[in-house]
Image (cartoon, rainbow, N blue to C red):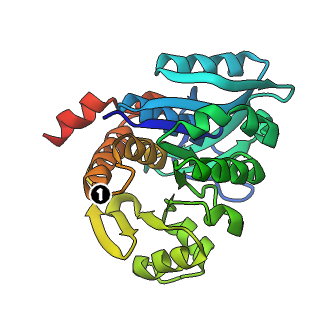
């Protein structure tokens, strides 16, 4: 069975600046390389879901500019439906990624058209939201339309997945309509106040107390901890040499949504698949260019 995944999210053109390390205050240092690639958490997740086998639709906004045309083309090339991608008077979103030789990155975001998504856009997309198996969103677009979308989804029995990134406090009304929340370690700490890095259990329980029904906390190169109802487990990461971690989390989430059953009965298998997809993505440069296909993930799992 093919999952129907709808993603409400951001579309950014990434400018990747390759550097040896982050500069110190007042320091000037050279870059070893500079290039542009498609990105944005929403676009990354949608393309990961589509490449990993899901029937995927996107709700978002681009500017009336060349970057917008580029992003629309990238979605279409990956068979993501763009019927609900609207054009804004603001410019297409951009991200500036400082990629260190270690593979770690720091990212600066210009929201642009992404920040013009409104309740009206959500209402216009009612059909594609309510006909989905999963609705996915993040925090690179306005929160209030996300709340409306999640409320709409739950009225139709759609499973909602919230990727709380970039980290910020989550409105109670959004958490109450969240079936699965997927923070990384840092985001989980910001959301819960749980400072012990070894206590994923405590953070997950706190997130459930705040309203989210189920939790996956991604732990980078260590793996992923999950709590579904009261069932808990840990799935270790695949060990690889990371070149660019920019799309690691987004690839994980998109791949997860392509494989997960609506009742979460295959949660461990879905996490293994998503982890393998993420491990392939970090071995290539760029966000969208690095996202693997379902066949590539399945071949790597053999």
On screen, residue 61 above or below 218: above
Q: Which quarter of the figure is the N terminus placed in?
A: top left
- Residue depicted at x 68% and y 26%: 85
Image quadrant in which you'd find residue 259: top left
Q: Is residue 272 above or below residue 89?
A: below
Quadrant of the snapshot with the C terminus: top left
> Around disc 1, counting alpha carbons within 10 Å, would you say few (fewer than 14), some (14 to 19), or many (20 or more)?
few
In the depicted view, which residue is nearer to us: 239 or 53? 53
Query: Residue 58's spot in the image, x, y percent?
Result: 59, 31
Horizontal side of 302 relative to 100 (left or right) equals left
Is 195 placed above or below 223 here? below
Q: Viewer-proximal residue, 116 or 66?
A: 116
Q: Please name the residue shown 33% across and 29% down the image.
A: 293
Farthest left residue in view: 302
Q: State how many labels appear.
A: 1
Q: Which residue is mark 1?
A: 265
Q: Position of residue 200 (x, y in %)?
A: 42, 76
The x and y percentages for residue 148 are 72, 50
Pick whichever, 204 or 71, lies toward us: 204
- Residue 175 visible in the current orientation: yes
The image quadrant of residue 94 is top right
């Amino acid at each position: 069975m093919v999952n129907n995944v709808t993603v409400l999210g951001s579309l950014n053109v990434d400018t990747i600046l390759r550097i040896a390390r982050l500069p110190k205050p007042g320091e000037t240092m050279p870059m070893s390389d500079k290039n542009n690639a498609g990105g944005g958490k929403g676009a990354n997740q949608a393309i990961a879901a589509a490449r990993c086998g899901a029937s995927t639709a996107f709700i978002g906004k681009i500017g009336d500019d060349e970057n917008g045309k580029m992003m629309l083309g990238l979605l279409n090339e990956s068979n993501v439906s763009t019927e609900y991608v609207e054009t804004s008077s603001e410019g297409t979103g951009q991200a500036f990624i400082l990629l260190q030789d270690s593979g770690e990155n720091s990212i600066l975001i210009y929201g642009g058209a992404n920040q013009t998504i409104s309740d009206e856009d959500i209402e216009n997309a009612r059909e594609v939201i309510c006909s989905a198996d999963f609705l996915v969103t993040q925090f690179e677009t306005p929160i209030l339309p996300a709340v409306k979308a999640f409320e709409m989804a739950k009225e139709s029995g759609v499973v909602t997945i919230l990727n709380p990134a970039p980290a910020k406090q989550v409105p109670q009304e959004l958490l109450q309509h969240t079936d699965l929340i997927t923070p990384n370690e840092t985001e989980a700490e910001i959301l819960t106040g749980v400072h012990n890095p070894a206590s994923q259990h405590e953070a997950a329980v706190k997130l459930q107390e705040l309203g989210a029904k189920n939790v996956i906390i991604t732990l980078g190169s260590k793996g992923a901890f999950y709590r579904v109802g009261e069932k808990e487990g840990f799935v270790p990461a695949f060990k690889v040499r990371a070149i660019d971690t920019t799309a690691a989390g987004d690839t994980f989430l998109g791949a997860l949504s392509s494989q997960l059953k609506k009742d979460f009965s295959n949660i461990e298998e879905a996490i293994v698949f998503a982890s393998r997809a993420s491990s392939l993505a970090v071995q290539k440069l760029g966000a969208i260019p690095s996202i693997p296909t379902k066949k590539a993930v399945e071949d790597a799992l053999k």
